[in-house]
Image (spheres, grey):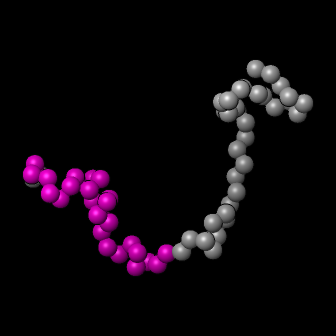
Amino acid sequence: MTHDANSKAQTGCRPDPTAGKRVSFGGLKDKISYSDKDFEDIDPDIQEMFYGRQDDDDRP
């Protein structure tokens, strides 16, 4: 491992796991919107994830 002029660890192509991550809050503000109505119905993808496909013959 080498150090550059700023004394940051250089590990080649792999990122340094000890380096801090920059966190940004509100980056998608005003870019994503939803309505409460979007969450009223059962999501078929979530149902399938927990209970399997509706057309499976081995379902109880």
* Near-viewer residue (25 or 11): 11
Which residue lies most toward the front here? 13
Exactly how many numbered labels are in the figure? 0
Residue 60: percent from left, percent from top = 9, 53
Q: Is residue 46 left or right of residue 22?
A: left
Task: Identify the residue at image location x=21%, y=55%.
Answer: 53
Position of residue 31 in the picture relative to residue 42 (left or right): right
Residue 16 percent across, percent down from the top left? 70, 32
Q: Is residue 54 magenta?
A: yes
Q: Residue at x 61, y 71 (%)?
A: 31
Residue drawn at 63 percent across, 74 percent down: 30
Q: Position of residue 24 (x, y in %)?
A: 70, 57
Q: Quadrant of the N terminus?
A: top right
- What is the x, y in percent for residue 37? 40, 79
Q: Which residues are magenta?
A: 34-58
In the image shown, does 32 or 40 lie closer to the viewer? Answer: 32
Q: Is residue 1 above or below residue 13?
A: above
